[in-house]
Image: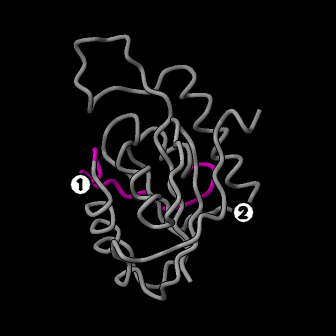
Amino acid sequence: MKTLLVLRHAKSNWDDSAAKDHERPLNARGERDAPRMGQFARDEQLLPELIVSSDAVRARMTAGAMADATGGQLVLDPRLYHAGPTDILAALRSVVEQNVATVMIVGHNPGLEELIAQLTGEREDLPTCALAQIALPIDRWSDLDISTRGTLVGLWRPKDLR
């Protein structure tokens, strides 16, 4: 059994209309929510050994706050920038060592919502900085594919933590 934690990046800043999408940082709310969700993950023992994140600035900042709170090793993967479920799973299979029990993916919608639906059969709204926990009936990350059926164990949104 493996655990996949799915985290959408925190709220990003749209103030600079000239900034490229990839370069947008977090806004004030995102800067508050990312550490709060990290603290929540630590308090709930949702501790990823490895955090695989999109290399977009807003995802990197969110993943960094999570790594600071949980102690997970952070790896940036440019393939996760606006990736769909197939690409996300391929990235996971290629970077995760087999002995790692819990991995967190940090990325973007709609790909993350589609990933949760594909793996669990449940359609859930994943607002910014929301965290989902999926139990996967696999022994090795290399066994993870689009046909894997896991269980959505929990879903937490920043508004739930107030």
Q: Amino acid at mark 2?
A: Gln
Secondary structure, mark 2, is: loop
Q: Is residue 95 left or right of residue 138?
A: left
Vertical comparison of 60 with 50: above or below: above
Q: Kindly indicate whether the residue at mark 1 contacts the one at mark 2 (C-beta within 8 angstroms).
A: no
- For the point 75% across and 58% down, the residue is 44
Percent position (x, y) of residue 151? Answer: 58, 70
Report how far apart the C-alphas of labels 2 and 1 lie in the structure. Answer: 28 Å
- For the point 27% across and 64% down, the residue is 86
70 within the magenta span: yes
Secondary structure, mark 1, is: helix
**Quadrant including the C terminus:** top right
Vertical comparison of 144 with 70: above or below: below
50 within the magenta span: no
Question: Label 1: which residue?
Answer: 79
Vertical comparison of 20 with 83: above or below: above
Q: Is residue 106 left or right of residue 68?
A: left
Q: Amino acid at mark 1?
A: Arg
Percent position (x, y) of residue 35? Answer: 62, 38
The residue range painted magenta reads: 68-82
- For the point 52% across and 76% down, the residue is 136
Percent position (x, y) of residue 67? Answer: 54, 52
Q: Nearer the viewer, residue 10 or 31?
A: 10
Vertical comparison of 100 with 15: above or below: below
- For the point 39% across and 47% down, the residue is 107
**Quadrant including the N terminus:** bottom right
Q: Nearer the viewer, residue 159 or 42?
A: 159
Residue extending farthest to the bottom is 139
Of labels 2 and 1, earlier in sequence is 2
Question: Label 2: which residue?
Answer: 45
What mark, if any, has residue 106 been given in the picture? none
Q: Sort mark 1 into few (<14), some (14-19) or many (20+) by Cα contacts within 10 Å.
A: some
